[in-house]
Image: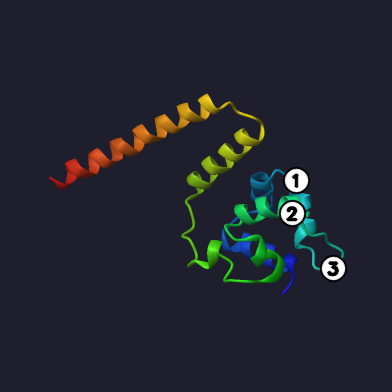
Amino acid sequence: MTIHRRIKERREALGLSMEALGGRVGVVWQTVQQWEKETGGTAPKRERLQKVADALETTPEYLSFGEKDGSANGAAHTPTLSEPARTLIDLVRVADAKGLPAYQFDSVSAALRILVSQLDHEALAAGD
C-alpha cells in the first residue's frame, strides 16, 4: 500500500472530508487530493508529514512505510470524536496557526474547564 492510500484510508476512517483534513494541516483541499492520488499525485513534504500524521491521529512512519497499525504509537484505534469536538479542535489549530496569543488560549481553556466542572457537579447531583 502507498502513502497516498494510507492517507486516504486514515482520513476516511476518521470521517474527515478533504476540506477538514486540509483545515487541520493548513492546506487547501486540492493539496489533500494530490496526496491521495495514486497516479500522478504528490506526497506531503517531509517538513509537513508530522502535521499530516497528527491530523490523521497516526505516525509519520505509518503514513510513509505502513509500520504499526495506523494509530498513534501503535495503540488501539482511538474513538472518533463528535463533530462539535472536531470542529473545536480544528478552530484551535487554525487560531494557533494564525498566531492567537497565549493569554487568549488561556481564556478559552478556563471557560472550557468551568463547563466540564459544571458537568461533573451535575453528574454528582444526579447520582444522589
Q: Would you name the residue on which mark 2 appears?
A: 32
User: Secondary structure beneath disc 1?
Assistant: loop
Q: CA distance from mark 3 to mark 2?
A: 14 Å
Q: Quadrant of residue 128?
A: top left
Three-letter code for the amino acid on which mark 2 is drawn: Val
- At x 54% / y 28%, what residue is drawn? 102
Using the image, determine if residue 120 lies above or below residue 36: above
Q: Would you name the residue on which mark 1 appears?
A: 28
Q: Would you name the residue on which mark 3 appears?
A: 39
User: Secondary structure beneath disc 3?
Assistant: loop
Three-letter code for the amino acid on which mark 1 is drawn: Val
Quadrant of the image containing the N terminus: bottom right
Three-letter code for the amino acid on which mark 3 is drawn: Thr
Could you tell me if the residues under marks 3 and 2 are in contact, i.e. CB atoms within 8 Å?
no
Badge 1 density bin: few <14, some 14–19, many ≥20, Cα 10 Å? some
Badge 2 density bin: few <14, some 14–19, many ≥20, Cα 10 Å? many
Q: Is residue 65 left or right of residue 38?
A: left
- At x 73% / y 66%, what residue is drawn? 3
User: Secondary structure beneath disc 2?
Assistant: helix
Q: CA distance from mark 3 to mark 1?
A: 20 Å
Could you tell me if the residues under marks 1 and 2 are in contact, i.e. CB atoms within 8 Å?
yes
Pick whichever, 97 or 28, lies toward us. 97
Badge 3 density bin: few <14, some 14–19, many ≥20, Cα 10 Å? few
- At x 60% / y 28%, what residue is drawn? 100
Using the image, determine if residue 91 lies above or below residue 101: below
Pick whichever, 50 or 113, lies toward us. 50
> If you read the primary sequence from the N terminus, does the residue marked by circle 3 or circle 1 appear first?
1
Residue 80 position within the rendered picture, expressed as x and y whole percent measured from the top left: 49, 57
